Image: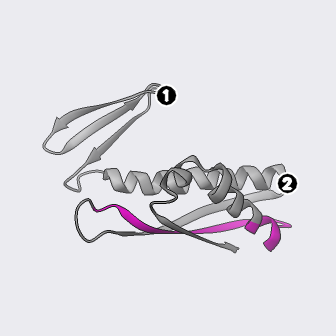
Amino acid sequence: MKAKVVWDNDLTFTGTTDSGYKTVMDGNGQAISPMESVLIAAGSCSSIDVVDILKKGRFDISHCECELVAERAENPPRVFTKIIACYKVKGEGLSEKAVARAVQLSAEKYCSVMLMLAGNVEIETRFEIL
């Protein structure tokens, strides 16, 4: 995997992946910030796992969202100290056991982003079946 980040102006940068996708990030609030992108990456990565695990369990998933709240250190570097990820899942025949298992497997075994943060960031997961 490769990527390139190019300075556009002020504190705005465009990142391009080797697959050709682009994203703009900014340090002055003109676009998503790098730390916001890490938070979204954690939620996206783990949500992909949750949906995939439930689909493989033959559940008919119709909705999945992940609301994230991050706490950051007061002083630089203002790293994440805690992330709370709350998954809201909707589908036919979903059980508490199945959703809890999918969330746990994602956070503890499959989600590359969360696993990279583990050990440095307290990660708490919750879920709700809609």
Q: Is residue 91 visible?
A: no
Which residue lies at the image location 65% right of the left edge and 58% below the top edge?
A: 108
Reply yes or no: does residue 49 show up in magenta: no
The residue closer to the viewer here, 63 or 58, is: 58
Question: Around disc 2, counting alpha carbons within 10 Å, would you say few (fewer than 14), some (14 to 19), or many (20 or more)?
Answer: few
**Which residues are drawn in magenta?**
78-100
- In the rendered image, residue 128, in percent from the top left (x then y), is placed at 67, 74
Residue lying at the far left of the rendered structure? 10
**Compared to 5, does 122 lie above or below?**
below
The tag earlier along the polypeptide, 1 or 2, is 1
Which label sits in the foreground, 1 or 2? 1
Q: Is residue 99 magenta?
A: yes
Q: Which mark is residue 57?
A: 2
Q: Which mark is residue 111?
A: none
User: Disc 1 versus disc 2: distance between alpha carbons?
Assistant: 30 Å
Task: Say above or below: 91 vs 16.
Answer: below
Work out whether 3 lies above or below 26.
Answer: above
x and y percentages locating residue 82 in the rendered image: 45, 69
Given contact means CB atoms under 8 Å apart, are the residues at marks 1 and 2 in contact? no
Task: Name the kind of residue labelled 1 in the image.
Answer: Met
Residue 40 visible somewhere in the drawing: yes
Q: Position of residue 73 (x, y in %)?
A: 31, 69
Question: Which SS class for mark 1?
Answer: loop
Amino acid beneath label 2: Gly
Label at residue 1: 1
The image quadrant that residue 4 belongs to is top left
Residue 71: image location, x then y, percent: 38, 71
Q: Nearer the viewer, residue 16 or 105?
A: 105
Q: Is residue 13 left or right of residue 117?
A: left
Q: Is residue 102 left or right of residue 68?
A: right
In the rendered image of this protein, does residue 26 appear above or below residue 61? above
